[in-house]
Image: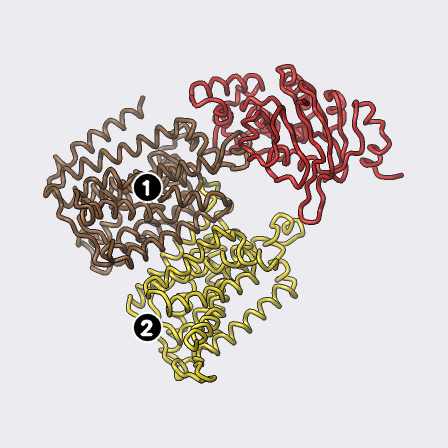
Chain colours: A yellow, B brown, C red
Amino acid sequence: MDVFIQTFVAGILIGGIYALIGIGMTLIMGVMKIINLAHGQLMMVAMYITYVLFEHLHLDPYFALLVAMPSLFVLGALLQKYLLNPLLKVDSILPENQVLMTVGIAMVLTEIIRFIFHSDYKSVRTGYSTANFYVGAISFNIALIIAFGIAVLLTIGLFFFLLKTDIGKSVRATAQNKEAALLMGINAEWITILTYGLGSALAAAAGTLLLPIYYLFPDIGGPFTLKAFVITMLGGMGSTVGAILGGIVLGVAESLGATYISMILKDAVAMVIFLLVLIFLPGGLKTLTKI
Amino acid sequence: MKRIGWQTILIIALLLFPVMIGSDYYRHIFIISLMWVIIGSSWNLLAGYTGQVSFGHAIFFGTGAYTAGLCVTKLGISAWWGMLLGGPVALLVGLVIGWICFRLRGPYFALATIAIGEIFRLVAIDWRSLTEGMEGILLIQSFRSKLPYYYLALVLAAACMFAVYLVLNSKWGYYFVAIREDQDVAETIGISSFRYKSLSLMISSYFTGMAGAFYMNYMAFIDPHVVFSLHDISIMAILVAIIGGVGTLWGPAVGAFIMVWLQEIFRSAFFGLLPQWVSEAHVLVFGLLVIFVIRYLANGIVGDWSKIVGPWFGKKQLSYSSSGNGQ
Amino acid sequence: MNFFETQHLTKSFGGLIAVNDLNFKVEQGEIFGLIGPNGSGKTTVFNLITGYHPISSGTIQFKDHSLNGLPTWKICKLGVGRTFQVVKPLRRMTVLDNVVASAFNHTGSLHEARDKALEVLEFCELIKKKDSQAKDLTIGDRKRLEIARALATDPTLLLLDETMAGLTPQEQAEGVELIRKIRNAGVTIIIVEHIMHVIMSICDRILCINYGQEIASGLPAEVANNHDVIEAYLGKE
């Protein structure tokens, strides 16, 4: 039973970070109606930024958030402005042109990083990376607890932004109905740039928070892109609350999978959940909760 | 009339090529290019003509390859039986995937194909009693010479393109394009979009599976990372088609040769002329090429041909048709 | 048995009732007008008939078939064609190919489908544009293409959704002519239209709805002078 609870707790904590990845992806999907297949790669870039700051300036990863998030915001905004938005004006056969563009972006980001840092594994080991405290027989990893706490704060901040500020409301309006939003005088192009930047910054936060307890290599982006869309799908595409649920469900499922199922197939857990949701619950978890 | 001219020349050139060029290295690159013509054309039928973008053609390629491999390791028969069985087995897999995804609208199909592709890869790694896991399947090649493989690949590629051509000039082709252009309209003119999307996927998966079986026979070695690879197979299939020209008959063929050659040129660091680090840049070059093509040549090299040659030859912009009447 | 009949046809989206207990019959060979102010549920009625939205309750019967629960493409196979209010040409196909795709409804042969398509284009006076890309057509020609595409499926019942909106008076007159020609060819028509003189001049009978409910029905003259109809359009005095 202790093993189960231990696994479950670890799953929820990692799920909090996954939620950040998922919310970023969901925002982009909601506003642009595209799957961002560069999401994990953007996160990977942020992780390398944090790694460099730690390695060369000895900056604590949590302070590196203050650099990594704005940097990725700018990177994301530029990508949207100069690579994704211009595609809207092009008449092409595949409506998925923007999605294919994100594939190209993902490839380029990964290869540039590989060029600079080579393929070997890196990690950021802080004093608290492996520190634990115990409640009964259950151990809590301190780095994970801090990461979870920051993830929750960022999520609350984001919800405040979306619900209370004018810009946040514009983002939501654009996600709900782009044409209506345009008629209301919302500058949709600007909103898409903002959203992609915001989504990238959230992915950056997740990456930075994961770094002290994870490892790093250029190809780490791909698996996280997959996780991101599984979370989004689980939550019901375009639903931010759903993405939080989806992130936690995925974290717990992976954690249980790693403990109770084959080590290799644990990676398939996310994909199987995804397929089950696709077949039996195509609207995602939000259709269960009516959020 | 002029068109028949260049097609005849092309066929004769392809038939004579391996006789004229003795180098096994160049023959090999041509064989791989022809294999990619099959995969690219298959992907294009489904995505370019029917509008259903797949990120998982490795599923069908790997299924075909493993079907051929398992013929030897499990059934004790020749891997060449895989050439007959690989297509149908992949088609069945396609049928199931279509049944799951095509009832839903939106990007579900694209997403599901990524997920299913990953599941296939991981299961192929983990199910060692069937697949030998990461050790892969190793066969003995039937022929030492490249020539039989070359002509087989040529016949298969020609058969695949001809099949696509026939489909496009039939009721199915018109229905596929109608679904791509507007699914609501397609339904109101009597098209069961579910049925015809499934048909398109079945044809596409059949030929991709056949290419996989060919790969097993030719390379004589497969493992899950090679044949179920998201990047090297699924994404490559997309690149081949979009660079050549989505929704054009010849686009994937052009794209296949460009991509395979480009890959080879970079891998060999321009045949050893440039420093070694260049060989690591081939994925980067692919990525930049994708970005460039999508941004500036949305219809690929074949689709935007008039746009490419126009400035130099001052030709009038040819009216470009991507509809069901072939090219 | 009636040619076409709805009984207690009702559709609600969430809490909003778009079509409410609608009963009407259409006789074979007539032009039946469906009118009402904006948002009164006319297009929804078409979407229900063609199976685009599932019916909440009630029945739709066409010849000896119930259309309830049938998928859109089967309803088309039974002989119901429709046009869209917001025209939806298959953009990157030629005009001819648009219509050929439709003409495959009752044949598997490209040759027959082409002949049928050419015949329909001739009938709709669109033959000169047959090689243009559908996306390059003018609005008037796009509306014609909508009609041609629907006709090529060989319908016995044709649903026309505002095929005159946005046309010049000249084009409207030609449109009226075309609709008469279609009826004379033996096709029964249900037409949704805003332009009153058009609807008054070609319809045999008219049903006026508002908020998804019937407010008047009968001969054009009767409906035009109905107090509730005038009120629905112009508001209360």
Residue type highlighted by circle 1: Gly
Residue furthest to the right in view is C237
The answer to whether residue B175 is visible is yes
Q: CA distance from mark 1 to mark 2?
A: 37 Å
Quadrant in the picture for residue B188: top right
Same-subunit check for callouts 1 and 2: no
The answer to whether residue A201 is visible is no
Q: Are marks 1 and 2 in contact (CB under 8 Å)?
A: no
Residue type highlighted by circle 2: Lys
Residue occupying image coordinates x 63% and y 19%: C187
SS at mark 1 in the image: helix
Residue occupying image coordinates x 25% and y 54%: B130
Rendering coords of residue A237 (x, y %): 53, 55
Q: Residues within 10 Å of mark 1 (few under 14, many from 20)?
A: many
Q: Is residue A153 left or right of residue A141?
A: right
- In this view, C8 is above or below C158: below
Residue closer to the observer: A37 or B294: A37
Q: Quadrant of the N terminus of chain C?
A: top right
- In this view, A48 is above or below A25: below
How many numbered discs? 2
Circle 1 sits on which residue?
B40
Chain letter for mark 2, please: A
Q: Is residue B200 left or right of residue A70?
A: left
User: In the image, which disc is placed on residue A122?
Assistant: 2
Rendering coords of residue B185 (x, y %): 54, 34
Residue occupying image coordinates x 21% and y 58%: B135
